Structure formats: C-alpha cells, structure tokens
Image (cartoon, rainbow, N blue to C red):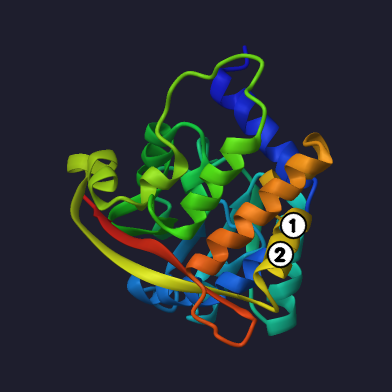
Amino acid sequence: MTTPAQTMAERTRQMWAAVDYHPIAVQDVLVSELLARAADVHSGHRVLDVAAGSGNSALAAARRGARVTATDIVPAALETAVRRAAAEGLQLEVEVADAQDLPFEDGTFDVVLSSFGAMYAPDQQRTVGELLRVCRPGGRIAMANWTPDGVVARLQRVMASVMPPPAQAAPPRKPPVAWGSEQHCRELFGDRVTSLSATVRVDEMCAPSAGAQVELMAGHLAPWHMATKVLPPESQQKLAEAAAAEYERVNRATDGTLVARAEYLEVVAVKA
C-alpha cells in the first residue's frame, strides 16, 4: 500500500523531472565547497550526498578525495552530476533514491551531506532518521538549509499567495525552511547526536537583473515552472513582479544587475 509520504515523493519527483535544475544549482557551488569543509571531509572518507541534484556537494567532497555516492529522486539530475564529475576527472557513484528511504546499510558513511535538498522531503522526522541511520557513530551529518526569514522563504510565501488552494487540504506540517532554524534542527536530531553546530551564512545569487533571475526560476525551478503552467497570465505577471521586488530588497548591486543576498543555515551534527 502506498503511503501519503510516498505519494507526495512521487509527485515531487515528477515535478522536478520536468525541469533542468542545473542552471539554478550552479549559483550555489560555493555553498557546497564551504559545507564539505565544515563537515571536515578527508581523503578516503565514505560520503553520501542526499537529494544531490546535479551534484554540487557530491563534487565538493570528491575534490577533497572522498569516495562519494550521490542520490536523488530525479535520474536526469544524477546524469548531469556524472557528466560534471567526468569533466573534472573525479569518481562518483550515483543511485536514484528518496531521502526518506535510503537504500544503504546502517552506518555505511563517514559523512552525510545535503545542500538545499533533504530539507524538502515531506516527512522531516523520517528524513532525519535516515540521515542518521546511514551515518556511522561518530560520523557527521552536514546540511545547508534556507532560513525561515531569508529571501528564499519570502519567495516561497509569494508563490503560496498566488497559487490556487489544493483540492484536498494537506495535513499541517512544518515548512521546508523550518530546517533553517537552529532550534528546529536541534529538536529533529535530539539526543541522537553528541554535538550540533549551526552557522548562518550568506549565499549570493547573481544575474543580469532581478527580472532575469525570475525568468531563470520560471524555466528551471520546479515550483515556479509549474506556476507558469497553471496560473493565468495576469497572475503570472503578479508573481513575477512580486518575486523581482523580493530580490531587489536584498540586492547589494547598484549598477542595475543583481547580487542578491540569500541567508542559509549551515548545520554540522556528530552522530552519537
């Protein structure tokens, strides 16, 4: 029998399979390099990148000499990760998998990474349980998660304000950006870790303009791409204008281009 979480995961897979996320992902390469450093990835470490997309964090770990496996629910994204690894002469294993149901034995990995990935799995308790299960005792789980008050969260609220309500109300749950709260992460990991450090960092999204960044999202970011399919033209215009305004609120560029500051939380937990 299919569970509600499995049904939602399949819908998510279909939604993300409809776009090529890589042009968005390349804006966040530095996030993954910093995450691999914060996780203290060493040469020879067994590393898992969960919800890896096109492989930013997997490649960051591979550049440090780790033995890396990348997982994602979208096969095409992993194919991009393989091509990127080959272009750099790096070794990378990939496997299609849901963050809520990882196909690995307990304690397989020294380090488990996820940048803007596992935070979007529907069942947060099940997801954190899987991240911990596949990590060895004394190993590290390191995540980069958008914060609840940063520009990404505000963009998500803008999106929610114009989308039609679902036909059937979903049960209440914490939003993905709850992972960007240190307190929420501490509650999720609980006493299953011996330590947890959290650092708020700032990513920068660069584009020719705020409008150009919104167009990039419409073409390559699954929820925004979906909105262009279901919203009437006037609502699409309203959404685009509101999103551009949110980017301008955090734009430090003064030459007409976009250098948008996007807060995220870098979390490193040590498994008990």
Q: Which residue is mark 2?
A: 22
Spatial separation of the CA atoms under disc 1 and disc 2: 8 Å
Q: Is residue 242 visible?
A: yes
Which of the labelled discs sits on residue 220, or is there none? 1
Q: Is residue 265 left or right of residue 123?
A: left
The quadrant of the image that shows the N terminus is top right
State the residue in front, 154 or 52. Answer: 154
State the residue in front, 45 or 73. Answer: 73
Residues at marks 1 and 2 touching, judged by CB atoms closer than 8 Å: yes
Q: Is residue 81 visible?
A: no
Q: Is residue 158 left or right of residue 231?
A: left
For image coordinates 40% across by 33% down, the residue present is 174
Q: Residues within 10 Å of mark 2 (few under 14, many from 20)?
A: some
For image coordinates 64% across by 81% down, the residue present is 257
For image coordinates 76% across by 60% down, the residue present is 79
Residue 80 pos. (x, y %): 75, 64
State the residue in front, 22 or 146. Answer: 146
Q: Nearer the viewer, mark 1 or mark 2?
A: 1
| Quadrant of the image occupied by residue 2 | top right
Q: Residues within 10 Å of mark 1 (few under 14, many from 20)?
A: many
Three-letter residue code for mark 1: His
Which of the labelled discs sits on residue 158, or is there none? none
Three-letter residue code for mark 2: His
For image coordinates 67% across by 48% down, the residue present is 239
| Quadrant of the image occupied by residue 113 | bottom left
